[in-house]
Amino acid sequence: EVQLVESGGGLVQPGGSLRLSCAASGFSFSDYTMNWVRQAPGKGLEWVSYISSRSNTIYYADSVKGRFTISRDNAKKSLYLQMDSLRAEDTAVYYCARVTYDILTGYGYWGQGTLVTVSS
Amino acid sequence: DIQLTQSPTFLSASVGDRVTITCRASQGITNYLAWYQQKPGKAPNLLIYTASTLQTGVPSRFSGSGSGTEFTLTISSLQPEDFATYYCQQLKTYPYTFGQGTNLEIK
């Protein structure tokens, strides 16, 4: 069974940093592209970042470019999101999501999400 | 960036109704569109990808159609568990934008 478990969320002050992790199990992690998607309280879904299976292609939403860094460790079956220079508008539940088969087939697997709150 | 506009934003319907949600893209995305269902406090659940392919395990009352810039999600006969928020997402090019969502409520 495919499982994705996020961790690392919490309360952080504006300008601070946080590192999210997503532990994967139940599939060959190194074969799949991964993504981070976030959802601000009461709002819709926002795609944040994409990383290819071997980390050779990475994309970011404009809203986080230059502040967030996605990475993965295929040996540890883990996905990461380093978040720096955090702003109040980054407050959201952050989900890691795996493509169903490839990028064109959507995100068939999601974690339960981890809440990041940016506030003084 | 490709913008996705869903309509309606809110939809009130009854059990047994047939409902249709529309997603319009600001430019052509071939058929690279997915639909998700999300219930409060839960992660989204993929319903359909490549505009019309039903994800494994999703009931056949859900169907998708369209290509280019206009797409629809249809639920043929609403069940109580279908009341949720629905999102479309384009997968043609990054950023892989989502629509703003359609909140489907019980009438």
Image (cartoon, coloured by chain):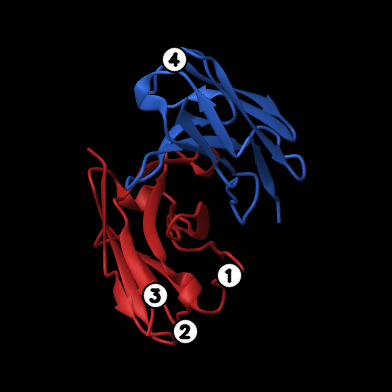
Chain colours: A red, B blue
Mark 1 falls on what kind of element? loop
Residue where numbered disc 3 is placed: A82
Q: Is residue A8 left or right of residue B72?
A: left
Mark toward the start of the polypeptide (1 vs 3): 1
Residue where numbered disc 1 is placed: A63
Residue where numbered disc 2 is placed: A85
Q: Which chain does the numbered disc 1 sit on? A: A
Give the residue furthest to the right. B27
Mark 2 falls on what kind of element? loop
Residue B4: x %, y % from top left:
67, 45
Q: Quadrant of the N terminus of chain A?
A: top left
Give the residue furthest to the front. B107
Residue type marked 2: Ser
Mark toward the start of the polypeptide (2 vs 1): 1
Residue type marked 4: Ser
Q: Is residue B39 left or right of residue A26?
A: right
Identify the residue shown where x is 59% and y is 47%: B100
Q: Which chain does the numbered disc 2 sit on? A: A
Q: Which mark is residue A81?
A: none
Mark 4 falls on what kind of element? loop
Within 10 angstroms of label 3, few (less than 14), some, or many (20 or more) residues? some
Gap in Å between the C-alphas at discs 4 and 2?
45 Å
| Front of the two marks 1 and 3 | 1
Is circle 2 on the same chain as circle 1?
yes
Residue B44: x %, y % from top left:
40, 42
Gap in Å between the C-alphas at discs 4 and 3?
40 Å
Residue B12: x %, y % from top left:
52, 28
